[in-house]
Image (cartoon, grey):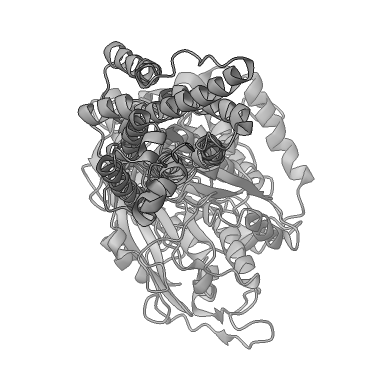
């Protein structure tokens, strides 16, 4: 164990070396490149490939184009060991234009770097892992810039390349003796996906496995391009699916996406869009990309573009920490705090830096973070770090100054003081303590950095047991075969630093396990609250979410508002989440969200048009106004007819009764009575019997009446015309003949009605079409007999024909002598009757669009029939009754005087 004790846990930095120097604006200085290992084993023993030669050229030319180095700070941490792990961390932020590095990043840089050092101490202090071997490290700063990180990563492979000028020879002609090359077996990192992609493209050429603790771009899962890349965090494809599930759980269907330019942001949004398409029901309003080097006013333009689709209040962000903060600042400056609801990826996570001072703009934001747990041992380790015991971290003094807002002696300024320009800065005493004199909270990716180192160590341990069964570092492990090491890394399975399982799938990805947070609070304060988790599915605790304004419902994020009751969606072509709402018209109801269907004939839509309901059935009842008036007229008519009949019978032998033609007068009175009686049949509720009576008697009474009047008129006309030519009376003018003619004419009506009954038996039905109106609320089903307007007119047609014929004869007989005293009254009666029936047509057919159509038509028909019966009753019989009852002296037979003797 002597080898292990030489450097395990060395806190003082005795084994820390500078492999070069650098400045804020500079790049690493050239360092002597060791000779290619002549005695190395495995895949690195062959001659350099073209790719290696290209890298060799780049490695020798790159420093020539770099800025002059500054001797202020080293660019790498070097810890000696039997096997070396590379490390890539964003110790500094991206610098302004022309300067590669900016201020130190305390959490994402120093915390993560210290996590790797802590993990190396744990591995080197654990006799069960890599016994008798020590893991060293070469840790580089990427400065949060992919191009700069590639420059730094070339130092990992320089020792594997032959010298640019050849091996050379010593003065005595012997080959030079060079130190053995650094055994770089794997790389931990990087943080940003864009950096990991560039580094992975270099490392794969030398079969060097790489394990990232934070890179989540989906394209890194491609084994054809990045076969040596693995990660202990799940890829964004899982994260994108989790974010899609969150968005759908919030009831959103129309969101915008916002991505930082680069692999992480662009591939993250691409994965989100792909997952949303597969899930369905989610549309992207806009996909906005933030440039890598944004111009002044760029973020105000971003907010302006988001407001172009202002109903898409949900905004999905795959952006870096700096871009997130500037987006929130732009929203606050536009007075839109609270309008947008943000859904942030793990780059936002539960960090306070993006939201500090912008709590109102960030309130309600949903963020996602790979499941993590705090590593208690790291808290104790990190809070115990000081300037004295942590000299191996060459950037720790920058962290110290920034964390305690002080200045070390002989230190150059690293940025503006916390109070702003001009604020005096106190000197650091060195006695400050982390967590006591400054706030401390373990950075979210610390667990994954430690797990990445442990995964590499477990893979090496497994390979060591297979390649060197006797223990120690044998020839098969000097250097280790990268392909074999990768296979062992992919097979590791252990509980990580926080007790969570660490495994990889065939693509080197960790399983998807996420915590869902919501930023709650505002007005200068706020905190992240865990509101759910995603492990192969979403479990969201909606009751714990806070959306402000005393509401538990998330703000809507939809293209179109939900359609109201009875409205269907008419999708906008090409944008399935946008639609226009169309009201189901007429007798339609909304069968589903996209379809309106007509209700069946016997149903009508409900007022909100969400279903159909039975149409009320309209029945004409005896007490209805439409029945009361016709019944009153018919009753009076029957009473008047009965009174006339009684009067005539009582004065049967009087001259007036005899002169009127008693037989036809009684037949005419019978027809008039039938016309009045039909009103009661028409008002009665339809049934088989009622419908049969309507067919029989609808036209029978009128036919009998007009047949009698026609016979009378014809008799008068023939007698008058015959008297002009001779004194011989015409034929068929006797009472018997007159009755025969009358009954024959009216019998044709009876015969036609009887045939109609036999050929088409009557029945009652509910006619929904007759009662259908433009407004379904007024629609009614009509209970009626099976004869509609056409059947009614057919039943009256023959009677009306008799009426017209009688009128023609009345016109012809208008010039008869006064002796034929009934000719002119019959003519007046027929003229009046014609007027009644001419008025009947418009009223009867004008009720076609009325909700009570059948009632109006029934009342019109019965009143017209009663009036047509009342006309002859009043014009022909009333004068005779008047004379019979009030002037009986006129009803005496005149006696002729005796002839003179």
Decide if residue 866 is on the left or right side of residue 2. Answer: right
Which residue occupies the foreground of this view, 713 or 128? Answer: 713
Instruction: Count every numbered label the image shows and give the total.
Output: 0
Which residue occupies the foreground of this view, 556 or 617? Answer: 617
* Vertical relation: 827 (above or below) 390: above
| Residue 371 can be seen in this image | no
**Point 31% across, 28% down: residue:** 697
Decide if residue 208 is on the left or right side of residue 102. Answer: left
Decide if residue 71 is on the left or right side of residue 345. Answer: right
| Residue 794 can be seen in this image | yes
**Point 30% across, 67% down: residue:** 380
- The spot of residue 838 in percent (x, y) is 56, 37
**Point 45% across, 47% down: residue:** 214
- The spot of residue 275 in percent (x, y) is 45, 36
Quarter occupied by residue 129: top left
Which residue occupies the foreground of this view, 699 or 224? Answer: 699
* Vertical relation: 767 (above or below) 518: above
Quarter occupied by residue 237: top left
- The spot of residue 859 in percent (x, y) is 40, 44
**Name of the residue lying farthest toward the front:** 901
Q: Quadrant of the N terminus?
A: top left
- The spot of residue 756 in percent (x, y) is 33, 15
* Vertical relation: 627 (above or below) 205: below
């Amino acid at each position: 164990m002597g080898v292990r004790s030489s450097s395990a846990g060395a806190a003082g930095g005795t084994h820390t070396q500078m492999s070069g120097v650098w400045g804020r604006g500079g790049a690493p200085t050239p360092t002597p490149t060791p000779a290619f290992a002549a005695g190395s084993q495995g895949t690195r023993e062959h001659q350099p490939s073209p790719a290696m030669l290209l890298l060799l050229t780049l490695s020798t030319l790159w420093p020539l184009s770099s800025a002059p180095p500054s001797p202020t700070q080293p660019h790498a941490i070097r810890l000696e060991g039997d096997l070396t792990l590379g490390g890539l961390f964003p110790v500094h932020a991206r610098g302004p234009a022309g300067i590669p590095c900016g201020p130190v990043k305390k959490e994402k840089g120093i915390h993560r770097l210290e996590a790797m050092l802590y993990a190396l101490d744990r591995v080197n202090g654990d006799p069960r892992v890599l016994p008798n071997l020590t893991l060293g490290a070469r840790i580089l700063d990427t400065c949060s810039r992919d191009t700069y990180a590639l420059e730094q990563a070339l130092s990992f492979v320089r020792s594997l390349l032959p010298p640019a000028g050849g091996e050379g020879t010593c003065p005595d002609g012997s080959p030079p003796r060079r130190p053995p090359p650094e055994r770089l077996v794997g790389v931990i990192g990087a943080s940003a996906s864009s950096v990991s992609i560039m580094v992975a493209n270099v490392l794969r050429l030398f079969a060097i496995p790489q394990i990232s603790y934070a890179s989540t771009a989906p394209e890194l899962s491609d084994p054809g391009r990045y076969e040596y890349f693995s990660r202990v965090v799940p890829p964004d494809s899982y994260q994108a699916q989790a974010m899609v599930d969150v968005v759908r759980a919030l009831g959103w269907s129309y969101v915008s996406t916002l991505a930082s330019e680069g692999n992480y942001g662009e591939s993250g949004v691409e994965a989100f869009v792909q997952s949303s398409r597969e899930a369905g029901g989610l549309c992207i309003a806009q996909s906005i990309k933030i440039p890598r080097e944004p111009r002044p006013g760029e973020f105000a333009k971003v907010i302006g573009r988001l407001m172009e689709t202002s109903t898409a209040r949900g905004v999905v962000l795959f952006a870096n920490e700096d871009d997130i903060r500037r987006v929130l600042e732009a929203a606050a400056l536009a007075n839109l705090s609270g309008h947008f609801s943000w859904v942030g990826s793990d780059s936002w996570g539960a960090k306070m830096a993006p939201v500090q001072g912008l709590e109102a703009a960030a309130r309600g934001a949903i963020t996602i973070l790979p499941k993590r747990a705090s590593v208690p041992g790291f808290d104790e380790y990190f809070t115990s770090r000081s300037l004295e015991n942590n000299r191996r971290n060459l950037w720790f003094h920058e962290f110290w100054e920034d964390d305690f807002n002080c200045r070390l002696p002989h230190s150059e300024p690293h940025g503006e003081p916390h109070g702003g320009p001009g604020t005096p800065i106190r000197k650091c005493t060195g006695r400050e303590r982390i967590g006591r004199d400054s706030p401390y909270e373990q950075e979210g990716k610390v667990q994954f950095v430690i797990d990445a180192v442990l995964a590499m160590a477990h893979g090496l341990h497994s390979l060591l047991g297979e390649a060197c069964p006797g223990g120690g570092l044998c020839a098969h492990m000097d250097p280790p075969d990268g392909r074999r090491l990768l296979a062992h890394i992919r097979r590791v399975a252990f509980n990580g630093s926080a007790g969570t399982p660490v495994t990889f799938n065939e693509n080197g990805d960790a399983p998807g396990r996420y915590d869902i947070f919501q930023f709650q609070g505002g007005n200068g304060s706020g905190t992240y609250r865990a509101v759910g988790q995603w492990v192969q599915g979403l479990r969201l605790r909606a009751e714990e979410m806070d959306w402000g304004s005393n509401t538990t419902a998330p703000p809507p994020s939809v293209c179109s508002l939900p359609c109201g009751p009875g409205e269907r969606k008419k999708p906008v072509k090409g944008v399935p989440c946008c639609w226009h709402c169309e009201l189901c018209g007429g007798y339609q109801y909304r069968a589903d969200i996209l379809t309106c269907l007509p209700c069946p004939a016997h149903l009508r839509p409900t007022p909100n048009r969400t279903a159909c309901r039975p149409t009320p059935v309209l029945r004409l009842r005896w007490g209805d106004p439409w029945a009361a008036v016709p019944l009153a007229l018919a009753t009076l008519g029957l009473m008047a007819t009965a009174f006339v009949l009684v009067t005539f019978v009582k004065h049967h032998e009087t001259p007036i009764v005899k002169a009127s033609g008693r037989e036809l007068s009684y037949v005419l009175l019978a027809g008039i009575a039938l016309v009045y009686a039909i009103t009661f049949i028409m008002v009665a509720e339809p049934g088989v019997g009622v419908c049969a009576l309507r067919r029989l008697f609808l036209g029978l009474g009128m036919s009998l009446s007009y047949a009698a009047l026609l016979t009378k008129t014809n008799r008068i006309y023939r007698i008058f015309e015959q008297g002009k030519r001779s004194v011989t009376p015409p034929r068929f003018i006797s009472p018997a003949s007159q009755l025969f003619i009358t009954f024959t004419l009216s019998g044709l009506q009876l015969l036609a009605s009887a045939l109609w009954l036999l050929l088409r038996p009557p029945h009652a039905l509910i006619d929904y079409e007759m009662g259908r109106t433009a407004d379904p609320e007024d629609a009614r089903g009509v209970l009626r007999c099976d004869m509609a307007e056409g059947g009614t007119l057919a039943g009256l047609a023959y009677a009306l024909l008799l009426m017209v014929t009688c009128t023609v004869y009345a016109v012809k007989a208008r010039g008869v002598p006064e002796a034929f005293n009934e000719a002119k009254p019959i003519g007046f009666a027929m003229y009046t009757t014609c007027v009644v029936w001419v008025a009947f047509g418009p009223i009867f057919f004008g009720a076609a669009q009325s909700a009570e159509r059948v009632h109006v038509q029934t009342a019109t028909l019965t009143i017209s029939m009663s009036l047509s019966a009342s006309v002859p009753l009043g014009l022909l019989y009333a004068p005779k009754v008047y004379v019979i009852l009030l002037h009986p002296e006129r009803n005496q037979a005149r006696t002729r005087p005796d002839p003179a003797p």
